[in-house]
Image: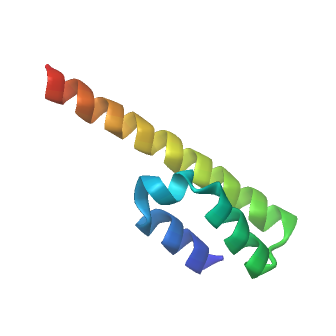
């Protein structure tokens, strides 16, 4: 599970949006339902944070 988290964070926005990669890695890792739910929640939170950060940078750049 730790390797998936590392790869997810290191991959940036592209990795966060690549649900095929994510679901393949989860299936290969044979995680429990609870572990999968925790990883999915992390992926969603990181995606939201990444989008917010990009919006903030865009706002500053165009000001």
Q: Which quadrant is the N terminus positioned in?
A: bottom right
Residue positioned 41% across, 58% down in the render? 12
Taking 22 as reference, is 6 above or below it? below
x then y, percent, for residue 13: 44, 52
Q: Name the residue at 34% across, 31% down.
A: 55
Relative to residue 61, is residue 59 drawn left or right?
right
Quadrant of the drawing holding the C terminus: top left
Q: Image quarter for residue 27?
A: bottom right
Judge by depth and name the residue closer to the eye, 20 or 12.
20
Residue 19 in percent (x, y) is at: 64, 56
Seen in the picture, residue 40 relative to 60 is either above or below; the reply is: below
Q: Is residue 21 above or below residue 14?
A: below
Q: How is the model colour-coded?
A: rainbow
Residue at (57, 79) in percent of width and height: 3
Residue 61 image point, x, y percent? 16, 29
Q: Measuring 25% from the left and 30% from the top, which residue is drawn there?
A: 58
């Amino acid at each position: 599970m730790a390797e998936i988290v590392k790869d997810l964070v290191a991959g940036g926005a592209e990795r966060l949006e690549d649900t095929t990669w994510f679901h393949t890695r989860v299936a290969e890792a044979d995680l429990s339902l609870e572990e999968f739910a925790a990883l999915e929640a992390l992926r969603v939170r990181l995606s939201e944070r990444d989008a917010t950060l990009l919006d903030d940078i865009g706002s500053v750049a165009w000001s």
